[in-house]
Amino acid sequence: MAQQLRLAVESIPGKRPYQEDSVHADVLADGRTLVAVADGMGGHAAGEVASALALETLSAAITEGKPLEDAFRLANARVHEMASEPGKQGMGTTLVAVLVDGREYLVANVGDSRVYLVSSDGIERLTEDHSFVAEAMKRGQSEEEAMATPWRDALTRSIGTDDEVEVDVTGPFTLKDDSAFLICSDGLYKTLSDEELQDLFAKSVSPRGAAQSLVTAAFDGGSDDNISVAIAEYGEVPRLTAPSTMVMEALDPSTDPDFREELDVPPSVKEVPPSETKPTEMLDESSLVGGLPVGALAAIVLVVGALVAILFFGS
């Protein structure tokens, strides 16, 4: 039986008063798996509507059998149409998705949300940002220079802002054993480097744990945006620490040599079973003479005899 993808999502508003991100991770009726993230624009009651509508349209279109690129274009048309309503003018969203079919997958992207592939080979970004920063870096600017401009958050492509949109679709690719897709909004990767993303994933014990650790680290690291992560893991990506199901048992000092060595206690003390010792008040009466133990009486006799001999012969 083929391995199943293990899915997890985590999404928080972060330091913002409202949530514009939406996430999706589900197995479709035909057995394919769709994992996607959308980062809305336009403020409360606009950005959140755009991202939710884009994912809803995408999922429905894929379920109906439409190709991934066509499903993206349909999502764009739906969001663009709603953007003409009062209070929603200019709204839009990023949209990034992975569609897994058996051992093959496709990746599609509009905007600057990302897909990473994590495996024993490291971390690899599978998407290209459609943003001012990405274009500036292509022209030779450093990332620091591009991020220092007022247009650092500007997108060059998005879902819903125009009636037509260009969609990047790559694949199909063969799904690697023991690998995971890490799909996220910019609230994650603008705070954490690729190396930090990989390190946090490697220190997790499950997709759910990885998603929670990543979001928490971005928030603690100062992200000022909504933070969303969706993970789809195939097999088991090598971790730095493996989960343990070992049941811990209390050490028995009388039988465990390691316990004895750690306490530096002589073996003779450790290895006497409790049943072979007797409390003083339970000693047999036959071992007493005149209320004194036999050994003590014998010692007194020897001492008195020695004193008598010294006095007699010494004189």
Image: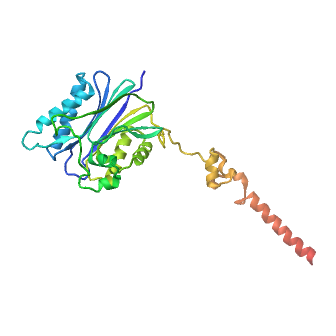
Q: Residue furthest bottom?
A: 315
Q: In this view, does 166 lie to the left or right of 284?
A: left
Relative depth, front residue between 277 and 296: 277
At x 69% / y 51%, what residue is drawn?
Answer: 268
In this orientation, which residue lies closer to the viewer: 138 or 120? 138
**Which quadrant holds residue 178?**
top left
The foreground one among 26 and 97 is: 97
Residue 107 or residue 137, whichever sits in front: 137
Who's the residue at 26% across and 41% down the image?
111
Location of the C terminus by quadrant is bottom right
Q: Can residue 222 be seen in this view?
A: no
Most extreme residue toward the left is 86
Residue 197 in sight here: yes
| x and y, in percent, of residue 68 in the image | 27, 28
Number of numbered discs: 0
- The answer to whether residue 254 is left or right of residue 38 is right
Q: How is the image coloured?
A: rainbow
Which quadrant of the view contains residue 102? top left
Residue shown at the point (32%, 48%) measured from the top left = 139
Residue 56 image position (x, y, % from top left): 20, 32
Q: Measuring from the top left, give residue 245's x and y in whole percent.
A: 48, 38
Quarter of the N terminus within the rendering: top left
Horizontal and vertical percent for residue 241? 48, 43
**Does residue 25 sit above or below 18 in this rendering?**
above
